[in-house]
Amino acid sequence: MVTVSAQFSRQGGQTPGPGLSGSTAKLFGDNSTFSANLEMQTSTDDGDNMTMPGKIFFDEGKSRFEMDTAELKGGKMSPQTAAQMKSIGMDKVIMISRPDKKVGYQVYPSMQAYVENALPDQEASGSGNDFKIEVTELGKETIEGHPCIKNKTIVTDKEGTRHESLVWNATDLKKFPIKIEHVEDKTKVTMLFREVSLSKPAADLFEPPSGSTKYDSMQSIIQQVMMKRLGGRKPEDQ
């Protein structure tokens, strides 16, 4: 449902980001374009909790999530790892998802570098017509100053798989889902949107920045950084 790409806290070096395509896009109803500050929270029964703030842009299934790893709270990233990432320019990350192209971009703006990856099937496939949604009203609450209707939503994909979430739809913001909560692989995932704008984001936000170099893998980017530090020599030559 609301996928967490590459679970940062559990994989020690991968970069996380929200997946807002596929069945998740159905939760936004008629709000097909927007931008907002997004706080994403994950928690498990064993206390492995993480809070990840960032900026999200969304346009007809395409998404862009900007984050700074220095702002992550919790998780299993050590201070040493965080400092090392900052020292080589990998602390700021942009995750771009392009279901229309079936690819995603992991961009490191400080390094002017990016990696292109194939999107998982659940993110790359499926139009809005491939998903059916059932909504059950549970009550009314105020979230982040917005009057909301709290709903239980069940999105069913074309294979018949059901994805259940709690969604708080803001009645003063065209029913925008200010808060989304669900359980994924025994992990509770909460997404909280602030300072929402329903304006259409610029198209170039969903492309790798001009002037950036494409690399085959994260290892290639890191090797290039190390080579520059070593005056063009490969680390294994030392």
Image (tube, grey):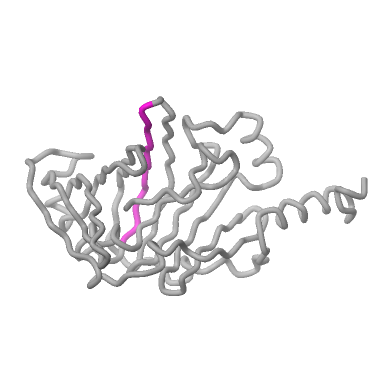
The structure residue drawn at horizontal position 41% and vertical position 74%, both measured from the top left corner, is 100
Q: Position of residue 133 (x, y in %)?
A: 16, 60
Find residue 126 and report its image quarter.
bottom left
Q: How many labels were placed on the picture?
A: 0
Q: Quadrant of the C terminus?
A: top right
Find residue 192 and report its image quarter.
top left
Q: Position of residue 121 (x, y in %)?
A: 42, 64
Q: Position of residue 211 (x, y in %)?
A: 65, 68
Q: Position of residue 29 (x, y in %)?
A: 20, 62
The structure residue drawn at horizontal position 47% and vertical position 30%, both measured from the top left corner, is 74
Residues in magenta, as a range:
34-45
* Residue 139 vs residue 3, the one in the foreground: 3
- Helix, strand or loop: magenta stretch: strand
Q: Is residue 119 above or below residue 78?
A: below
* Residue 85 vs residue 75, the one in the foreground: 75
Residue 39 lies in the magenta stretch: yes
The structure residue drawn at horizontal position 22% and vertical position 49%, both measured from the top left corner, is 164
Find residue 27 and report its image quarter.
bottom left
